[in-house]
Image (cartoon, grey):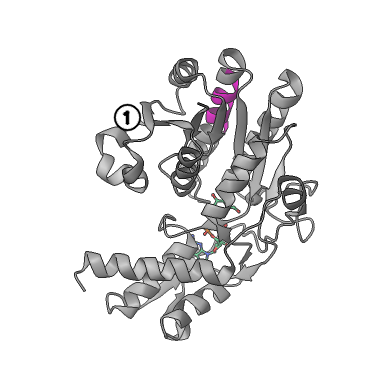
């Protein structure tokens, strides 16, 4: 039985990926912080239904000894490094923790694998945020990076660390350059979930407005459940290589809002307020990915359309709120 180690299992991607790996017969291990173990109802909510099937270990990406110990103990065949401070945030105090956690955490895992399990296959969750102020549209694996946030910069560093372990130590280490991917399990701080949750609230009379930042930013939005399949496929190839994973369609935040409200028979213009509080000092204006390489070499195809994604998220939020408020 193959053993997989997932970091970031409590997030959206971690929950879909662990289901996928369990269905494929893997023994699934993960690390979570002690605080999450002490508050499982809240912090492990996305994987509550998997808790009996996966092995959870207490470790922190900020502690090299704890990562080293876990890697040595589990001896994983595949490692999916998804954990990161993943919200693109600008407050000054967040800059340092984003850089420290994201860069050091990746380095600690790579170094531990190199010394304790060098034949483990390693997946790094890189991001389209690395393209930032894009040098071309659409972006592909050879497009130059130009990150516009500490988060993006930390992901470029993680990408380079991964590439360097591959080249210097001959490890099977690669990066998936994933574009925005969403689902009903998305965190409320990200724009898609903020929109679908508020639209459902407005429909049920639980809110009367939705405050958003830049409505003209464009993103290539896919579904998390499609994207975790690409992660797995990448680690099954003969040679390690980096891949862009995207739908090849871009839509503005405005289009997303319009469609989500339309599905509830609402006119977004009556409820959406543009609030400069949510503007970013260095915005990424447009992201559009060219996933030809993933399609040709991995045989990967997304199943969800933009429409399907919004519909699933809106319906799930309506249900969630109805249950919560006994409606
Ligand atoms: N979060 C948020 N809140 N974003 C808003 C809002 C708002 O009220 N109003 C407009 N936006 C715009 C942002 O300015 C941005 O252009 C776009 O909506 C998407 O923002 P997010 O959903 O926060 O995602 P992101 O694109 O910054 O980052 C996500 O995608 C990356 C891949 O490109 C995250 O999932 C990253 O972790 C991921 O790497």
Q: On screen, 69 above or below 101?
A: above
Q: Is 52 on the left or on the right of 235, as rendered?
A: left
Assess whether residue 240 is covered by the magenta stretch: no
Q: Kindly identify the residue that appears in the image at 47 percent across and 47 percent down.
A: 16
Question: Which residue is situated farthest in the left direction here?
Answer: 326
Image quadrant assignment for residue 322: bottom left
> Percent x, y for residue 57?
37, 26
Quarter holding the C terminus is bottom left
Q: On screen, 136 above or below 174?
A: below
Read off the magenta span.
103-111
Image quadrant assignment for residue 305: bottom right
Q: Kindly identify the residue that appears in the image at 55 percent across and 36 percent down.
A: 99
Q: On screen, 253 above or below 137?
A: below
Image label count:
1
Neighbor class of circle 1 (other Cα within 10 Å; few <14, some 14-19, many 20+) is few
Q: Is 192 on the left or on the right of 42, as rendered?
A: right
> Percent x, y for residue 210?
40, 73
User: Quarter containing ligand 1?
Assistant: bottom right
> Percent x, y for residue 285?
66, 63
Q: Which residue is mark 1?
A: 34
> Percent x, y for residue 207?
30, 75
Magenta span: helix, strand or loop, mainly? helix
Helix or strand or loop: what does disc 1 sit on?
helix
Residue placed most toward the observer, 141 or 303: 303
Q: Is residue 64 visible?
A: yes
Q: Is residue 156 visible?
A: no
């Amino acid at each position: 039985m193959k053993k997989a180690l997932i970091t970031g299992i409590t997030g959206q991607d971690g929950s879909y990926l662990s289901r996928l790996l369990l269905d494929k017969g893997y023994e699934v291990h993960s690390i979570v912080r002690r605080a999450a173990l002490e508050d499982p109802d809240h912090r492990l909510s996305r994987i509550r239904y998997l808790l009996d099937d996966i092995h959870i270990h207490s470790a922190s990406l900020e502690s090299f000894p704890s990562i080293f110990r876990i890697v040595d103990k589990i001896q994983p065949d595949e490692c999916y490094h998804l954990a990161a401070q993943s919200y693109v945030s600008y407050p000054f105090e967040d800059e340092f923790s984003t850089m420290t956690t994201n860069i050091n955490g990746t380095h600690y895992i790579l170094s531990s694998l190199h010394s304790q399990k060098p034949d483990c296959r390693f997946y790094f969750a890189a991001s389209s945020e690395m393209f930032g102020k894009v040098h071309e549209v659409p972006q592909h694996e050879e497009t130059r990076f130009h990150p516009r946030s500490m988060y993006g910069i930390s992901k470029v560093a993680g990408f380079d660390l991964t590439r360097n372990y591959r080249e210097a130590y001959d490890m099977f280490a690669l990066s998936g350059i994933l574009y925005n991917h969403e689902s009903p399990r998305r965190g409320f701080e990200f724009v898609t979930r903020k929109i679908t949750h508020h639209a459902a609230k407005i429909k049920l009379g639980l809110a009367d407005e939705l405050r958003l930042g830049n409505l003209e930013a464009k993103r290539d939005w896919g579904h998390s459940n499609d994207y975790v399949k690409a992660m797995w496929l990448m680690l099954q190839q003969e040679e390690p290589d980096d891949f862009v994973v995207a739908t090849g369609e871009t839509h503005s935040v405005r289009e997303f809002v319009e469609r989500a409200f339309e599905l509830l028979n609402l006119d977004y213009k009556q409820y959406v307020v543009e609030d400069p509080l949510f503007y970013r000092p260095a915005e990424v204006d447009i992201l559009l990915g060219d996933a030809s390489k993933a399609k040709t070499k991995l045989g990967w195809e997304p199943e969800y359309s933009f429409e399907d994604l919004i519909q699933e998220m809106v319906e799930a939020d309506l249900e969630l709120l109805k249950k919560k408020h006994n409606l």
